[in-house]
Amino acid sequence: MQVNPTFTRAFTLNSGLHFNMDTPVRRPRIDPKFAGYKLSIRRSKIHRYGVYAEERIPANRKVIEYTGERLNRRETKRRGEGEYTYLFTLDKYWTLDGAFGGSGAEIINHSCEPNVVSRIMKGHIIYMSRRTIEPGEEITVDYNFEYVGDRTFCACGASNCRSVMERMTPKLERDLAKEKAARAASTGRAGARRAGANGKVEPQSALESKAKSKAAYI
Ligand SMILES: [Zn+2]
């Protein structure tokens, strides 16, 4: 499988989820033992595969539990530095690796306007519905990546999409505004220059080229 190198890098969520966007989970499937409702895995418009509701799910219900191999801090760090897939921190000491013994919740895609939210209850990570979910709807959760300098382009399609998967902080807001201003200035300059040369304006920002490569990859 062709892997776009832009996205084969590690991310850390403020929830403690380490994530490699392009590591495929082998034979994705839903384990009905951990699902509160009938769910399926299908191709997603958001990214590769997604999890879909196969029946109506009322608000505030358990949709699925996020399961995986339980890792201590040392093992988490080791896997976090190597080839890994889906690590979700349960608490200060324990992390679940959804790549091993995952319920299928690890396939759930990010959205800036998600229909489920993760809650930690008695040592379990539970994805709860935020509203009624209709049959056929894709299940989504906000990854809320911690912003540590890297930004992950988001194309979730929500009307309030913040354009990145990182949790919005004042610093991120400032950096995005700066980038937008720089892009506008650069596109303006390039536009004037190129319009003189060949009348064509090309995308200038890293964010835009990322968007293009991701779209191509999907
Ligand atoms: Zn988004």
Image (cartoon, grey):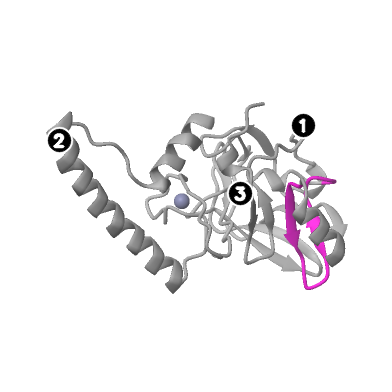
Query: For mark 2, does the 10 Å Cα neighbourhood hold few (<14), some (14 to 19), or many (20 or more) residues?
Result: few
Q: Residue at x 62, y 33 (%)?
A: 3
Determine whether, in the image, residue 198 is placed left or right of residue 150: left
Residues under numbered marks 1 and 2 in contact, where contact means CB atoms less than 8 Å apart: no
Using the rendered view, name the quadrant where residue 66 is placed: bottom right
Q: Disc 3 on helix, strand or loop? A: loop
Q: Residue at x 73, y 46 (%)?
A: 85
The residues tagged by marks 3 and 1 sit, at their Cα atoms, a distance apart of 25 Å
- In the image, the segment drawn in magenta is 84-101
Q: Position of residue 65 (x, y in %)?
A: 75, 54
Please name the amino acid that badge 3 sits on. Ile
- Above or below for 14 versus 100: below
Q: Residue at x 70, y 47 (%)?
A: 106
Residue 66 makes an appearance in the image: no
Q: Disc 1 on helix, strand or loop? A: loop
Q: Disc 2 on helix, strand or loop? A: helix
Judging by the rendered image, the residue that carries numbered circle 1 is: 27
The residue nearer to you, when weighing 85 against 213, is 213
Give whichever of discs 1 and 2 has the lower sequence position: 1
Give whichever of discs 2 and 3 has the lower sequence position: 3
Query: Residue 94: within the magenta?
Result: yes
- Ligand 1 within 8 A of label 1's CB? no
Please name the amino acid that badge 1 sits on. Arg
Q: Position of residue 188 (x, y in %)?
A: 19, 48
Q: Position of residue 138 (x, y in %)?
A: 56, 41
Front disc: 1 or 2: 2
Judging by the rendered image, the residue that carries numbered circle 3 is: 57
Judging by the rendered image, the residue that carries numbered circle 2 is: 195
- Above or below for 20 versus 29: below
